Image: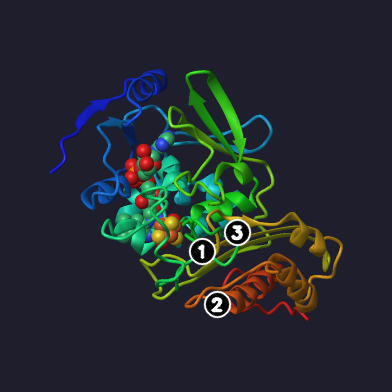
Protein backbone atom coordinates (compact mmCIF):
# COMPACT_ATOMS: atom_id res chain seq x y z
CA UNK A 1 0.00 0.00 0.00
CA UNK A 2 1.47 3.32 -1.05
CA UNK A 3 0.29 6.30 0.96
CA UNK A 4 -0.99 9.32 -0.93
CA UNK A 5 -2.79 12.53 -0.04
CA UNK A 6 -6.22 13.43 -1.35
CA UNK A 7 -7.47 16.97 -1.94
CA UNK A 8 -10.40 18.44 -3.79
CA UNK A 9 -9.86 21.41 -6.13
CA UNK A 10 -12.22 24.36 -5.56
CA UNK A 11 -11.89 25.83 -9.03
CA UNK A 12 -9.61 25.63 -12.07
CA UNK A 13 -7.13 28.15 -10.64
CA UNK A 14 -6.96 26.17 -7.41
CA UNK A 15 -6.36 22.93 -9.36
CA UNK A 16 -3.46 24.56 -11.24
CA UNK A 17 -2.08 26.02 -8.00
CA UNK A 18 -2.18 22.64 -6.26
CA UNK A 19 -0.55 20.70 -9.08
CA UNK A 20 2.13 23.37 -9.54
CA UNK A 21 2.97 23.21 -5.83
CA UNK A 22 3.47 19.44 -5.91
CA UNK A 23 4.86 18.10 -9.21
CA UNK A 24 4.30 14.45 -8.16
CA UNK A 25 0.56 15.11 -7.68
CA UNK A 26 -2.01 14.01 -10.28
CA UNK A 27 -5.49 15.12 -11.18
CA UNK A 28 -8.22 12.54 -10.85
CA UNK A 29 -11.47 12.85 -12.82
CA UNK A 30 -13.46 9.63 -13.36
CA UNK A 31 -10.55 7.55 -12.07
CA UNK A 32 -11.20 4.69 -14.52
CA UNK A 33 -7.61 4.67 -15.78
CA UNK A 34 -5.60 6.31 -13.00
CA UNK A 35 -6.88 4.08 -10.20
CA UNK A 36 -6.07 0.94 -12.21
CA UNK A 37 -2.56 2.24 -12.81
CA UNK A 38 -2.12 2.99 -9.11
CA UNK A 39 -3.33 -0.49 -8.18
CA UNK A 40 -0.72 -1.97 -10.53
CA UNK A 41 1.97 0.29 -9.03
CA UNK A 42 2.58 1.92 -12.43
CA UNK A 43 1.54 5.37 -11.25
CA UNK A 44 2.56 6.55 -7.77
CA UNK A 45 1.15 10.05 -7.28
CA UNK A 46 1.96 11.64 -3.92
CA UNK A 47 -1.40 13.43 -4.02
CA UNK A 48 -4.65 13.02 -5.92
CA UNK A 49 -6.23 16.35 -6.78
CA UNK A 50 -9.90 15.60 -7.31
CA UNK A 51 -11.21 17.79 -10.13
CA UNK A 52 -14.49 15.92 -10.54
CA UNK A 53 -16.55 18.69 -8.89
CA UNK A 54 -15.24 21.55 -11.07
CA UNK A 55 -17.83 23.29 -13.26
CA UNK A 56 -16.53 21.76 -16.51
CA UNK A 57 -19.52 19.55 -17.32
CA UNK A 58 -21.24 21.74 -19.89
CA UNK A 59 -21.63 21.24 -23.64
CA UNK A 60 -22.33 24.61 -25.26
CA UNK A 61 -22.55 26.05 -28.75
CA UNK A 62 -19.78 28.45 -29.79
CA UNK A 63 -20.23 31.72 -31.66
CA UNK A 64 -18.61 30.11 -34.72
CA UNK A 65 -21.26 27.39 -34.93
CA UNK A 66 -19.16 24.72 -33.21
CA UNK A 67 -19.39 23.06 -29.82
CA UNK A 68 -17.38 23.51 -26.63
CA UNK A 69 -17.25 20.38 -24.49
CA UNK A 70 -16.22 20.77 -20.84
CA UNK A 71 -13.35 18.50 -19.78
CA UNK A 72 -15.54 16.78 -17.17
CA UNK A 73 -18.46 15.92 -19.46
CA UNK A 74 -18.85 12.15 -19.00
CA UNK A 75 -18.33 10.08 -22.15
CA UNK A 76 -21.94 8.78 -21.99
CA UNK A 77 -23.47 12.25 -21.67
CA UNK A 78 -21.39 13.44 -24.60
CA UNK A 79 -22.29 10.52 -26.88
CA UNK A 80 -26.02 10.99 -26.20
CA UNK A 81 -26.02 14.78 -26.20
CA UNK A 82 -28.57 15.82 -28.87
CA UNK A 83 -26.19 18.27 -30.56
CA UNK A 84 -23.45 15.64 -30.76
CA UNK A 85 -25.83 12.94 -31.97
CA UNK A 86 -27.23 15.24 -34.68
CA UNK A 87 -24.20 17.25 -35.78
CA UNK A 88 -21.19 15.10 -34.84
CA UNK A 89 -22.44 11.49 -35.05
CA UNK A 90 -18.90 10.30 -35.84
CA UNK A 91 -17.92 11.39 -32.33
CA UNK A 92 -20.94 9.70 -30.76
CA UNK A 93 -20.13 6.47 -32.66
CA UNK A 94 -16.50 6.51 -31.59
CA UNK A 95 -17.35 7.04 -27.92
CA UNK A 96 -19.97 4.28 -27.95
CA UNK A 97 -17.46 1.89 -29.53
CA UNK A 98 -15.26 2.25 -26.44
CA UNK A 99 -15.18 0.54 -23.06
CA UNK A 100 -18.55 -0.38 -21.46
CA UNK A 101 -21.65 1.57 -20.47
CA UNK A 102 -20.56 1.69 -16.82
CA UNK A 103 -17.09 2.93 -17.70
CA UNK A 104 -18.44 5.53 -20.11
CA UNK A 105 -20.64 6.86 -17.30
CA UNK A 106 -17.55 7.55 -15.19
CA UNK A 107 -14.96 8.42 -17.86
CA UNK A 108 -14.48 12.13 -18.56
CA UNK A 109 -13.63 13.94 -21.78
CA UNK A 110 -10.28 15.17 -20.42
CA UNK A 111 -9.43 11.77 -18.91
CA UNK A 112 -10.12 10.05 -22.22
CA UNK A 113 -7.53 12.26 -23.93
CA UNK A 114 -4.99 11.51 -21.22
CA UNK A 115 -5.58 7.79 -20.74
CA UNK A 116 -2.37 5.82 -21.04
CA UNK A 117 -1.37 3.01 -23.37
CA UNK A 118 -2.59 -0.54 -22.85
CA UNK A 119 0.81 -2.10 -23.71
CA UNK A 120 1.00 -5.15 -21.42
CA UNK A 121 4.62 -4.37 -20.47
CA UNK A 122 3.71 -0.85 -19.40
CA UNK A 123 1.36 -2.44 -16.85
CA UNK A 124 3.84 -5.13 -15.76
CA UNK A 125 6.36 -3.48 -13.44
CA UNK A 126 8.56 -6.59 -13.54
CA UNK A 127 9.52 -5.83 -17.16
CA UNK A 128 11.57 -3.02 -18.77
CA UNK A 129 9.49 -0.24 -20.31
CA UNK A 130 10.81 3.12 -21.45
CA UNK A 131 7.43 4.74 -21.05
CA UNK A 132 7.13 3.71 -17.40
CA UNK A 133 10.84 3.86 -16.51
CA UNK A 134 12.79 5.96 -19.04
CA UNK A 135 16.01 4.30 -20.17
CA UNK A 136 15.02 0.78 -19.05
CA UNK A 137 14.33 -0.52 -22.58
CA UNK A 138 11.27 -1.60 -24.54
CA UNK A 139 10.05 -5.14 -23.90
CA UNK A 140 7.54 -5.05 -26.73
CA UNK A 141 9.91 -4.60 -29.68
CA UNK A 142 11.27 -8.15 -29.37
CA UNK A 143 8.36 -9.40 -27.27
CA UNK A 144 4.63 -9.81 -27.71
CA UNK A 145 3.63 -6.95 -30.00
CA UNK A 146 0.34 -7.98 -31.59
CA UNK A 147 -1.51 -4.88 -30.35
CA UNK A 148 1.33 -2.46 -31.06
CA UNK A 149 1.99 0.32 -33.55
CA UNK A 150 2.75 0.11 -37.25
CA UNK A 151 3.20 3.85 -37.84
CA UNK A 152 5.36 6.51 -36.18
CA UNK A 153 7.24 4.04 -33.97
CA UNK A 154 10.69 4.66 -32.53
CA UNK A 155 13.48 2.50 -31.15
CA UNK A 156 12.32 3.54 -27.70
CA UNK A 157 8.61 2.62 -27.88
CA UNK A 158 6.03 1.05 -30.19
CA UNK A 159 2.93 1.57 -28.03
CA UNK A 160 -0.41 2.79 -29.35
CA UNK A 161 -2.80 5.36 -27.93
CA UNK A 162 -5.92 3.39 -26.93
CA UNK A 163 -8.67 5.99 -27.25
CA UNK A 164 -11.59 5.75 -29.68
CA UNK A 165 -12.96 9.21 -28.93
CA UNK A 166 -9.64 10.83 -29.82
CA UNK A 167 -9.67 9.29 -33.31
CA UNK A 168 -12.95 11.05 -34.06
CA UNK A 169 -11.70 14.27 -32.46
CA UNK A 170 -8.62 14.13 -34.72
CA UNK A 171 -10.80 13.70 -37.80
CA UNK A 172 -13.03 16.57 -36.71
CA UNK A 173 -10.03 18.92 -36.25
CA UNK A 174 -10.84 19.63 -32.61
CA UNK A 175 -8.96 22.06 -30.38
CA UNK A 176 -7.95 21.32 -26.79
CA UNK A 177 -8.26 24.18 -24.30
CA UNK A 178 -5.95 24.06 -21.31
CA UNK A 179 -5.11 26.28 -18.33
CA UNK A 180 -1.81 26.58 -16.50
CA UNK A 181 0.16 28.98 -14.29
CA UNK A 182 0.71 31.28 -17.30
CA UNK A 183 -2.98 31.35 -18.18
CA UNK A 184 -5.07 29.61 -20.83
CA UNK A 185 -3.91 28.32 -24.21
CA UNK A 186 -5.35 26.28 -27.06
CA UNK A 187 -3.67 23.26 -28.67
CA UNK A 188 -4.68 21.92 -32.08
CA UNK A 189 -5.72 18.29 -31.68
CA UNK A 190 -3.01 17.13 -34.10
CA UNK A 191 -0.40 18.66 -31.77
CA UNK A 192 -1.86 17.40 -28.51
CA UNK A 193 -0.60 13.81 -28.52
CA UNK A 194 3.04 13.04 -29.31
CA UNK A 195 4.95 10.37 -31.17
CA UNK A 196 7.30 8.37 -28.91
CA UNK A 197 10.66 9.39 -30.46
CA UNK A 198 13.22 9.37 -27.64
CA UNK A 199 10.81 10.42 -24.89
CA UNK A 200 7.96 7.91 -24.81
CA UNK A 201 7.29 8.79 -21.19
CA UNK A 202 5.60 11.94 -22.55
CA UNK A 203 2.26 11.05 -24.15
CA UNK A 204 1.13 14.61 -24.84
CA UNK A 205 2.28 18.22 -25.09
CA UNK A 206 0.26 19.16 -22.01
CA UNK A 207 2.63 20.48 -19.35
CA UNK A 208 2.54 18.68 -15.97
CA UNK A 209 1.11 21.82 -14.31
CA UNK A 210 -1.66 22.34 -16.87
CA UNK A 211 -5.26 21.13 -16.76
CA UNK A 212 -7.50 20.39 -19.74
CA UNK A 213 -10.57 22.58 -19.44
CA UNK A 214 -12.47 21.89 -22.69
CA UNK A 215 -12.42 20.43 -26.17
CA UNK A 216 -13.83 22.55 -28.98
CA UNK A 217 -15.29 21.25 -32.23
CA UNK A 218 -15.46 23.41 -35.36
CA UNK A 219 -18.79 23.86 -37.10
CA UNK A 220 -18.34 21.18 -39.72
CA UNK A 221 -19.47 17.82 -38.33
CA UNK A 222 -19.71 15.68 -41.51
CA UNK A 223 -23.04 14.33 -40.25
CA UNK A 224 -24.22 13.13 -43.65
CA UNK A 225 -21.24 11.03 -44.73
CA UNK A 226 -19.18 9.52 -41.95
CA UNK A 227 -18.29 6.29 -40.25
CA UNK A 228 -16.32 5.11 -37.24
CA UNK A 229 -15.22 1.55 -37.89
CA UNK A 230 -13.53 -0.31 -35.04
CA UNK A 231 -11.91 -3.71 -35.61
CA UNK A 232 -11.20 -5.60 -32.39
CA UNK A 233 -10.94 -9.10 -30.97
CA UNK A 234 -14.38 -8.96 -29.31
CA UNK A 235 -17.43 -6.99 -30.35
CA UNK A 236 -17.51 -5.01 -27.11
CA UNK A 237 -15.27 -4.14 -24.20
CA UNK A 238 -12.07 -4.41 -26.23
CA UNK A 239 -9.56 -1.88 -27.50
CA UNK A 240 -9.11 -1.35 -31.22
CA UNK A 241 -6.68 -3.40 -33.27
CA UNK A 242 -7.39 -0.86 -35.96
CA UNK A 243 -10.05 1.82 -36.09
CA UNK A 244 -10.94 4.33 -38.78
CA UNK A 245 -12.77 7.64 -38.53
CA UNK A 246 -13.79 8.54 -42.08
CA UNK A 247 -15.73 11.67 -43.00
CA UNK A 248 -16.58 13.04 -46.43
CA UNK A 249 -18.18 16.15 -47.83
CA UNK A 250 -19.64 15.20 -51.21
CA UNK A 251 -20.93 17.17 -54.16
CA UNK A 252 -22.78 14.55 -56.11
CA UNK A 253 -20.22 11.74 -56.37
CA UNK A 254 -17.24 14.09 -56.10
CA UNK A 255 -15.31 14.44 -52.86
CA UNK A 256 -15.12 18.08 -51.84
CA UNK A 257 -13.41 17.38 -48.54
CA UNK A 258 -12.21 14.26 -46.74
CA UNK A 259 -11.05 13.45 -43.24
CA UNK A 260 -9.37 10.21 -42.31
CA UNK A 261 -7.91 9.25 -38.93
CA UNK A 262 -6.71 5.88 -37.66
CA UNK A 263 -6.69 4.44 -34.15
CA UNK A 264 -4.83 1.42 -32.78
CA UNK A 265 -1.88 1.94 -35.13
CA UNK A 266 0.28 4.67 -33.57
CA UNK A 267 1.23 6.50 -30.38
CA UNK A 268 -1.34 9.15 -31.36
CA UNK A 269 -4.43 9.21 -33.57
CA UNK A 270 -2.91 8.95 -37.04
CA UNK A 271 -3.89 11.55 -39.58
CA UNK A 272 -2.01 12.47 -42.74
CA UNK A 273 -3.12 15.51 -44.75
CA UNK A 274 -1.65 14.04 -47.94
CA UNK A 275 -4.06 11.08 -47.80
CA UNK A 276 -6.95 13.52 -47.49
CA UNK A 277 -5.55 15.64 -50.32
CA UNK A 278 -5.41 12.50 -52.47
CA UNK A 279 -9.18 12.18 -52.09
CA UNK A 280 -10.10 15.81 -52.74
CA UNK A 281 -11.72 16.33 -56.15
CA UNK A 282 -11.88 12.58 -56.85
CA UNK A 283 -14.95 10.49 -57.58
CA UNK A 284 -15.97 8.69 -54.39
CA UNK A 285 -15.22 5.15 -55.49
CA UNK A 286 -13.20 2.15 -54.43
CA UNK A 287 -10.16 3.00 -56.54
CA UNK A 288 -9.86 6.48 -54.99
CA UNK A 289 -10.25 4.94 -51.53
CA UNK A 290 -7.55 2.34 -52.29
CA UNK A 291 -5.19 5.12 -53.34
CA UNK A 292 -5.86 7.08 -50.15
CA UNK A 293 -5.19 3.94 -48.07
CA UNK A 294 -1.87 3.48 -49.90
CA UNK A 295 -0.87 7.04 -49.06
CA UNK A 296 -1.93 6.76 -45.43
CA UNK A 297 -0.06 3.49 -44.92
CA UNK A 298 2.98 4.14 -47.11
CA UNK A 299 5.37 4.21 -44.12
CA UNK A 300 3.71 1.40 -42.15
CA UNK A 301 6.08 -1.13 -40.66
CA UNK A 302 5.03 -4.29 -38.82
CA UNK A 303 6.76 -6.19 -36.05
CA UNK A 304 6.80 -9.96 -35.41
CA UNK A 305 3.17 -10.31 -34.33
CA UNK A 306 1.42 -7.27 -35.74
CA UNK A 307 2.32 -7.11 -39.45
CA UNK A 308 -1.27 -8.25 -40.13
CA UNK A 309 -2.39 -4.79 -39.04
CA UNK A 310 -1.10 -3.21 -42.26
CA UNK A 311 -3.48 -5.19 -44.47
CA UNK A 312 -6.23 -4.94 -41.85
CA UNK A 313 -5.86 -1.15 -41.79
CA UNK A 314 -5.90 -0.96 -45.61
CA UNK A 315 -9.16 -2.94 -45.78
CA UNK A 316 -10.70 -1.02 -42.88
CA UNK A 317 -9.89 2.34 -44.49
CA UNK A 318 -11.52 1.34 -47.77
CA UNK A 319 -14.55 -0.14 -46.02
CA UNK A 320 -14.99 2.90 -43.81
CA UNK A 321 -14.79 5.26 -46.79
CA UNK A 322 -17.29 3.15 -48.74
CA UNK A 323 -19.68 3.31 -45.81
CA UNK A 324 -19.14 7.05 -45.39
CA UNK A 325 -19.75 7.66 -49.08
CA UNK A 326 -22.94 5.60 -48.97
CA UNK A 327 -24.15 7.65 -46.01
CA UNK A 328 -24.90 4.55 -44.01
CA UNK A 329 -22.34 3.90 -41.30
CA UNK A 330 -21.72 0.19 -40.87
CA UNK A 331 -24.85 -1.08 -42.61
CA UNK A 332 -25.49 -2.09 -46.18
CA UNK A 333 -27.00 0.59 -48.37
CA UNK A 334 -29.18 0.62 -51.43
CA UNK A 335 -27.10 3.47 -52.77
CA UNK A 336 -24.68 2.03 -55.29
CA UNK A 337 -20.98 2.86 -54.93
CA UNK A 338 -18.74 1.66 -57.74
C1 LIG B 1 -11.69 -2.15 -18.93
C2 LIG B 1 -11.57 -0.86 -19.70
C3 LIG B 1 -11.86 -0.84 -21.05
C4 LIG B 1 -11.74 0.35 -21.77
N1 LIG B 1 -12.00 0.35 -23.11
C5 LIG B 1 -11.84 1.49 -23.82
C6 LIG B 1 -12.04 1.54 -25.21
O1 LIG B 1 -12.38 0.52 -25.84
N2 LIG B 1 -11.86 2.72 -25.86
C7 LIG B 1 -11.49 3.86 -25.19
O2 LIG B 1 -11.36 4.90 -25.83
N3 LIG B 1 -11.27 3.84 -23.88
C8 LIG B 1 -11.43 2.70 -23.18
N4 LIG B 1 -11.20 2.68 -21.84
C9 LIG B 1 -10.54 3.84 -21.24
C10 LIG B 1 -11.48 4.84 -20.67
O3 LIG B 1 -12.12 5.50 -21.73
C11 LIG B 1 -10.57 5.81 -19.90
O4 LIG B 1 -10.14 5.11 -18.75
C12 LIG B 1 -11.31 7.06 -19.50
O5 LIG B 1 -11.69 7.80 -20.64
C13 LIG B 1 -10.43 7.94 -18.63
O6 LIG B 1 -11.22 9.00 -18.13
P1 LIG B 1 -11.27 9.29 -16.55
O7 LIG B 1 -12.04 10.52 -16.35
O8 LIG B 1 -11.73 8.08 -15.79
O9 LIG B 1 -9.72 9.55 -16.29
P2 LIG B 1 -8.86 9.35 -14.95
O10 LIG B 1 -8.58 7.92 -14.74
O11 LIG B 1 -9.45 10.12 -13.83
O12 LIG B 1 -7.53 10.11 -15.42
C14 LIG B 1 -6.74 9.61 -16.45
C15 LIG B 1 -5.53 10.53 -16.61
O13 LIG B 1 -5.94 11.80 -17.08
C16 LIG B 1 -5.54 12.83 -16.20
N5 LIG B 1 -6.63 13.81 -16.25
C17 LIG B 1 -7.96 13.55 -16.14
N6 LIG B 1 -8.67 14.67 -16.40
C18 LIG B 1 -7.76 15.65 -16.64
C19 LIG B 1 -7.87 17.03 -16.99
N7 LIG B 1 -9.07 17.64 -17.13
N8 LIG B 1 -6.73 17.74 -17.18
C20 LIG B 1 -5.52 17.16 -17.05
N9 LIG B 1 -5.36 15.85 -16.72
C21 LIG B 1 -6.46 15.12 -16.53
C22 LIG B 1 -5.33 12.15 -14.86
O14 LIG B 1 -4.37 12.85 -14.06
C23 LIG B 1 -4.80 10.79 -15.30
O15 LIG B 1 -3.43 10.87 -15.56
C24 LIG B 1 -11.34 1.52 -21.10
C25 LIG B 1 -11.08 1.51 -19.72
C26 LIG B 1 -11.18 0.33 -19.02
C27 LIG B 1 -10.89 0.34 -17.55
S1 LIG C 1 6.01 -0.31 -26.38
FE1 LIG C 1 6.30 1.50 -25.10
S2 LIG C 1 4.89 1.12 -23.43
FE2 LIG C 1 5.27 -0.87 -24.37
S3 LIG C 1 7.10 -1.77 -23.39
FE3 LIG C 1 7.83 -0.60 -25.11
S4 LIG C 1 8.33 1.38 -24.18
FE4 LIG C 1 6.92 0.39 -22.79
Q: Which residue is mark 1?
A: 264
Q: Earlier in the sequence, mark 1 or mark 2?
A: 1
Q: Nearer the viewer, residue 81 or 110?
A: 110
The one of 319 and 86 positioned closer to us in this rendering: 319
The C terminus - image quarter: bottom right
Q: Which residue is mark 3?
A: 152
Mark closest to the chain's N terminus, 3 or 1: 3
Q: How is the image coloured?
A: rainbow
Which label sits in the foreground, 1 or 2? 2
Give the percent coordinates (x, y) of residue 323: 65, 72
Question: Could you classify mark 1 by the number of other residues whose Cα lies within 10 Å: few (under 14), some (14-19), or many (20 or more)?
Answer: many
Q: CA distance from mark 3 to mark 1?
A: 12 Å
For label 2, the residue is: 307
The structure residue drawn at horizontal position 60% and vertical position 31%, both measured from the top left corner, is 186
State which quarter of the image contains the N terminus. top left
Helix, strand or loop for disc 1 = loop
Residue 169, labelled with which disc? Answer: none
Helix, strand or loop at disc 3?
loop
Amino acid sequence: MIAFQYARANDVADAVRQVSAEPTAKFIAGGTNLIDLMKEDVERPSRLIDISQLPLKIVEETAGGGLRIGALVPNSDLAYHPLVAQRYPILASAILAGASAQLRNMASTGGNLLQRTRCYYFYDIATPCNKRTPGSGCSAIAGLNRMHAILGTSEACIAVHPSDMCVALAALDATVHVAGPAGARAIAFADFHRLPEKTPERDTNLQPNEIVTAVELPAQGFAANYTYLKIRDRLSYAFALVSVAAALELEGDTIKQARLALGGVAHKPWRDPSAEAALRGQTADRSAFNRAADVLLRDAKGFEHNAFKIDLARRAIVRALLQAAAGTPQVQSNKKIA
